[in-house]
Image (tube, rainbow, N blue to C red):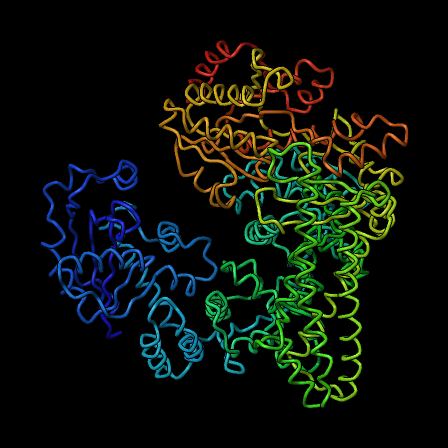
Amino acid sequence: MKQRFVVVDVETTGNSPKKGDRIIQLAAVVIEEGKIIERFSSFVNPKKKIPSFIEQLTGITTEMVEDAPAFKEIAEKVSSLLDDAYFVAHNVHFDLSFIQEELNRCGIQMFTGPILDTVELSRIVFPSADSYKLSELCRDLGIQHKNPHRADSDAEVTGELLIHILSRLSSLPSVTLHSLKRLSASFISDAEEMLEELETMSELRLKEALDIEVYRSVAVRKMADTKQNPDQSGTEKLPFHAFAEKLMNENGSVAAHFVQYEKRSEQVNMMKSVYQSFASHQHSLIEAGTGTGKTLGYLVPAVYYALTEKKRVLISTYTTALQQQVMEKEYPLLKQAAGLPFSMAVLKGRSHYLCLRKFEKYLNEEDMNYDNLLTKAQLLIWLTETETGDVDELNLPSGGKLLWQRLHYDPKLSGSASNPWKERCFYTRAYKRANQADVIMTNHSLLLSAVSSSSDMLEGIEEVVIDEAHHFERTASEHLGKRIHYLTLQALTNQLGNLYTDGLLRKTQQLFSKKKWSEPFLEIDAILKQLAEDNQLLFTTLHSYVLQNQKDSSSNRIACRFSHDEKKSRKWLAILELAARVKFQLHDMMSIMNKQKGVFSRLEEGEESFDLYEYWEVLDRFKAAYDSLDSLFFKDSPGEVKWIEIESRGARNAVSVYSQPVSVSDQLADGFFASMKSAVLTSATLTVNGTFDYMISELGLSDFYPSVRKIDSPFDYKKQAMLMIPSDFPSVQHVTLDEYTEAIAGRVSEIAKAASGKLLILFNAYDMLKKTQQLLKNDQSLDDFVIMGQGGGSITKLTKNFRQFEKAILLGTSTFWEGMDFPGDELTTLVIVRLPFSPPDDPRTAAKCEQLTKEGKNAFYHYSLPEAVLKFKQGFGRLIRTENDKGLLFVFDKRIIEAKYGRHFIDSLPDIEVSVEPMARLHKKIAGWKNSRT
């Protein structure tokens, strides 16, 4: 390329040049023809003291810049560097604002040329990147970043990042570059001229890359053949036990392909148990301890059974992350190791897959929304890369996630015969791959949807593995329940708009006016206005109602259970009146739109319109909202629990209303397990007090008499872990909440200083977490530790930051009790503040306990205790993830040793040493433990 790019980075005393913050270091690299041709770097004397937090962040001290030149001494050099060039930076407005302010202060003309923001360009060019932080982009691209937060290093790597960006853009088809150029008018970056030159260069190449095809002016990656397993004649005829032994022994095929593989008798035992369940057509539950190698433990028998019996096997997981891990790691390696021509495929819900027909339409639609334009640009490049069309591959901006809701697959439009993209449809192809695969992977939610809707996804499936099975009952409850939120209706009214703005309602009116039938739109416009007002009033009134009826105002997330019999107060009757008004408005809307649909379908004789299709889609969603509202507020549903949930410190309309079955055992028994020959449910946490009775009852498996197997972890927990319980820790019943929180912070401080390394502190209550976090931050003796808590950013970001520091304390609630892996030195100490009992006023817990009491059972021992024990086991599972890990578990809740049910928690752990002593003595033991670790 002929353009000149100057990549700039500045370190400063703060964030605002207008408030007197100044540059302390400036660096620039000059790029021409795809190479760095010049570098410039200098410390800058800001004529003021550098704040201590800036010194810590950058390593630049006031003393280091005392003899450095003032900006005016380098101003001419900076200005000349920028002549006739693009100004480039990572978050360009930050760096440019400081440069402009300094140039202006020196009386030199400010920069007026084009700018490029590498954050924005990276979002577009690398749409699947996990993060757009400079350090993480460098890691992904293999760029060595030696000194983050130093201008010379940051400018150098940003320059290299720009070269990667330009290289990727120059490889794109001309039609993609042409579309990007059209979108770029609203970008932060002045990229139009650059994209035009790249487009010209692309056209001169005459032909596109071999794996790209251009269809209807959109470049997409060529679709691979969906046909799988053309020849399975090589399948071995060995009996399963011989096949498993041959595959998994220390000199076998798996050992040759899996790094650091060691034969585990526990894993082979699990394989045999899974296969036995399939072969005997019996349901089974298998608790496989950490380190068993659970994934291969069910994959190998699933593959063998599918090939030998010529039947498809389905595997369901709770998270899509585990699906991705299996498909990217275990599947290809196992396929090589086994030497068998088997295939696996992932099938997700329709909303995961892009509809190319919709994308083509919306790509060419005028749009002034920045997030929408950025998302369209990301999708243009992603389409030249993706084989799946799955949104999980993308890192969309928040507004882009709203656009995706308009772009994903829908069978009525995407699957219609008139769809010109039908042969390239991502969902259809994913479905075909799944139908032809030997082993299908899906998630609990989609599996349960297929059960309830009698989807043909399960056609021919009689063997299924439910991984992460401890989540299956809760997922079923959520799936069989209902939920309505303020945004449920607000999103629909926003989507329609009104007759005086260029929205869907006005576009549809124009279609109807061609047929001289546009009168009802005036009535619809009036209803929509009133519906938006009443929807807002209903949910703000619900918010106030919950706040007035709550017992404890300290928690942010508050749930308030309700039923139709007991809520006869004036306040509740006012809520019912508001709900009725919203319901009647929805009814009126639906009546008019249904009449429109009948009239228009006769007039148009099948002619299709995107706007009209979207309009009828809104009608369907209005119907769903009407049904939910009617069921939640006006129908008595025995066997269901209903509640309102709010964020007390959130927006006044941040309210959800839920209903869920109190028990799903009958529905699962009749609707799912009865239709399967073999369902294998596996997890690291299925037993309570040594038995599977609780899980069997909850899942509705009692009448099926499933086989059960508990496979212990191969880890030597006696050597790897120790449970420490401070005997002098106060009981929460005998002190105030503030005193209890101070005790938590004090003990955590002691443990942190003695154990060093990284600590994870698990809480049940968010407010206790925040109070403890503040106390720890105020503890000057912990200055060496980075202290972070849930609620201060995304879970992913929090986890990455925790892994990054040598000394760190992470305070977490529900999310961190399970699913987070911190192997080795990523976690050395785990603290469980209180035993994880659900609050007695939690709506589901209260309803479950009431039902059990009516049945004459002890609700605590039949429900509350088993649930808490299972969560406790999940929490402990965060500590020891590999056979080389060593770690300490602290439990501050003395009920574990004082209550007669406390043994259930201790007995749920592997065989580890338990030490119950005053904190002073435990402190000495920590030191001994630490020394034994090193």
Q: Could you say where residue 577 lies in the image, as x and y percent from the top left?
A: 78, 54
Camera-nearest residue between 341 and 822: 822
Q: Could you say where residue 421 lies in the image, as x and y percent from the top left?
A: 61, 78
Camera-nearest residue between 376 and 458: 376
How many marks overall? 0
Q: Is residue 290 left or right of residue 62?
A: right
User: 930 above or below 147?
Assistant: above
Q: Let me know if residue 608 appears in the view.
A: yes
Q: Let me know if residue 278 appears in the view.
A: no
Q: Quadrant of residue 507?
A: bottom right
User: 63 above or below 620?
Assistant: above
Q: Which quarter of the image is occupied by the C terminus?
A: top left
Q: Quadrant of residue 868?
A: top right
Q: Could you say where residue 673 lies in the image, as x and y percent from the top left?
A: 83, 47
Q: Quadrant of residue 486?
A: bottom right
Q: Which quarter of the image is occupied by the N terminus?
A: bottom left
Q: Could you say where residue 487 lies in the image, as x and y percent from the top left?
A: 64, 58
User: 864 above or below 198?
Assistant: above
Q: Is residue 370 left or right of residue 686?
A: left
Q: Is residue 719 left or right of residue 439?
A: left
Camera-nearest residue between 408 and 696: 408
Q: Is residue 123 left or right of residue 221?
A: left
